[in-house]
Image (spheres, rainbow, N blue to C red):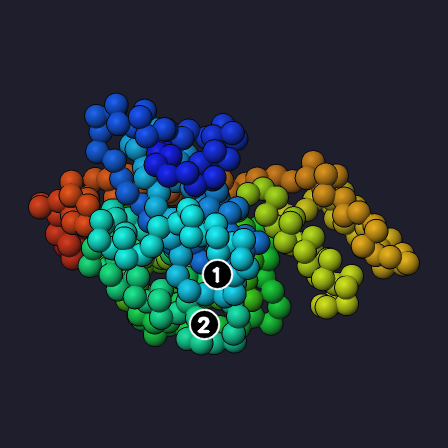
């Protein structure tokens, strides 16, 4: 689904320069096809704001080469913003009030950088709830990622995440549980997903409140879940949108913090660096710790990148393709009207009817 560059947002140029399919507005207007309008609620902190735009927009744009997609990026109050980022948001982002007035077909919500110990104390918590309550009435489907999944599961269903004894990060094997669900059509039953979190929600917690579990980790933590109808809200706990180097850059930030004395030495991301790369990373840390000026010892990013494998993007692309295809099939022609006249809003995929007829 080619994204349409309908505003001067720099991410459109960055994606086009990287070879991604991005249509200009004149090109889009000469194609006779019903477009999709997708909201992207970006709640990431300043350092990750633009790269997060590109990660999610790349997945959306790679999903299908036919349907035109207008991605409308917006945000809500969250953590502190510097002057440069505020200016960027003011110039390129759309306000939620404007999107609410014009309507959306679907919504993607990113994660966020937590500032407090309790989700309900986060500045974004209530504004996010307001967006989700509106979307529940006016948007065909909302796809939540990481911390937004935790926040919505707590706010809407009373599901509280559990703190982990240590940060869980790396690339982990996952498996499909509901293999016949349309969101999982055509993908492998087992695949990898990047993970980076201090808290987790299990599949058992999801099932206990009547939600569907579509995919999970090998030890039973949620990866993909949905509302009972199977599509109105999609929950993802992992990070299938991550670039190949995302965990490496996160590891570098953790190493830099350790060298400044802010945190203990970080473990290597699990399942991510092969033995040769792990040796290079360990050698760098050892040299930096004995140097008079640790910051003068360059992090060997270019060396490590050569060893990285991406074992998740194809699956992520397939899931997004299925999701957008379902949205396109179900959504009415007029923006702001979630379903076509023949679609049952309580069972839009016909899952209940299929089960009853089995």
Position above or below: 154 against 254: below
Position above or below: 1 against 228: above
Q: Is residue 313 left or right of residue 60?
A: right
Q: Quadrant of the N terminus?
A: top left
The local crowd at label 2, few if under 14, some if 14 to 19, many if 20 or more residues have their Cα within 10 Å, is some
Residue 272 point in image, percent of width and height: 63, 48
Residue 64 point in image, percent of width and height: 35, 32
Would residue 44 be visible to someone looking at this image?
yes
Q: Quadrant of residue 340?
A: top left
Reading the image, the residue beneath label 1 is: 112
- Res. 204 mark: none
Dot 1 falls on a residue whose secondary structure is strand
The residue under the point 30% across, 61% down is 131
User: Going from the N terminus, do you reach mark 2 or mark 1 first?
Assistant: 1
- Mark 2 to mark 1: distance in Å? 10 Å
The residue under the point 47% across, 30% down is 16
Dot 2 falls on a residue whose secondary structure is loop
Q: Nearer the viewer, residue 147 or 128?
A: 128
Residue 66 point in image, percent of width and height: 30, 28
Q: Nearer the viewer, residue 301 or 37?
A: 37
Reading the image, the residue beneath label 2 is: 122
Q: Quadrant of residue 243?
A: top right
Position above or below: 86 against 209: above
The residue under the point 32% across, 24% down is 27
Would residue 172 be visible to someone looking at this image?
no
Q: Nearer the viewer, residue 295 or 161?
A: 295
Position above or below: 255 against 350: below
The residue under the point 62% across, 68% down is 166
Q: Nearer the viewer, residue 240 or 95?
A: 95
Residue 289 point in image, percent of width and height: 85, 59
Do the residues bearing badges 2 and 1 touch, measured as CB atoms within 8 Å?
A: yes
């Amino acid at each position: 689904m080619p994204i349409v560059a309908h505003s001067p947002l720099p991410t459109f140029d960055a994606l086009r320069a990287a070879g991604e399919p991005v249509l200009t507005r004149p090109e889009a207007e000469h194609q006779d096809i019903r477009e999709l309008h997708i909201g992207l609620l970006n709640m990431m902190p300043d350092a990750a704001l633009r790269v997060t735009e590109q990660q999610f927009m790349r997945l959306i744009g790679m999903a299908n080469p036919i349907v035109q997609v207008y991605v409308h990026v917006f945000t809500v109050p969250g953590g502190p913003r510097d002057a440069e980022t505020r200016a960027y948001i003011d110039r390129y982002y759309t306000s939620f009030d404007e999107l609410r007035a014009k309507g959306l077909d679907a919504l993607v919500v990113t994660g966020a950088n937590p500032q407090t110990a309790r989700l309900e104390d986060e500045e974004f918590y209530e504004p996010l709830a307001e967006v989700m309550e509106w979307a529940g009435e006016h948007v065909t489907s909302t796809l939540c990622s990481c911390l937004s999944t935790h926040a919505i599961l707590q706010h809407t269903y009373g599901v509280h995440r559990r703190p982990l004894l240590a940060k869980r990060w790396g690339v982990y094997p996952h498996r499909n549980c509901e293999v016949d669900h349309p969101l999982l059509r055509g993908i492998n039953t087992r695949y990898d997903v990047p993970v980076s979190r201090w808290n987790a929600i299990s599949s058992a917690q999801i099932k206990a409140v009547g939600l569907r579990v579509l995919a999970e980790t090998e030890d039973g933590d949620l990866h993909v879940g949905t509302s009972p109808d199977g599509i109105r809200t999609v929950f993802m706990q992992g990070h299938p949108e991550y670039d190949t180097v995302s965990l490496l850059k996160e590891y570098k930030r953790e190493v830099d913090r350790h060298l400044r004395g802010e945190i203990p030495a970080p473990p290597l991301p699990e399942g991510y660096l092969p033995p040769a790369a792990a040796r290079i990373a360990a050698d760098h840390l050892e040299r930096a710790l004995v140097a008079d000026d640790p910051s003068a010892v360059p992090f060997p990013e270019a060396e490590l990148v050569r060893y990285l494998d991406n074992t998740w993007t194809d699956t992520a692309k397939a899931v997004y393709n299925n999701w957008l295809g379902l949205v396109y099939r179900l959504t009415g022609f007029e923006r702001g009207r979630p379903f076509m006249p023949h679609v049952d809003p309580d069972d839009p995929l016909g899952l209940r009817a299929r089960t009853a007829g089995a």
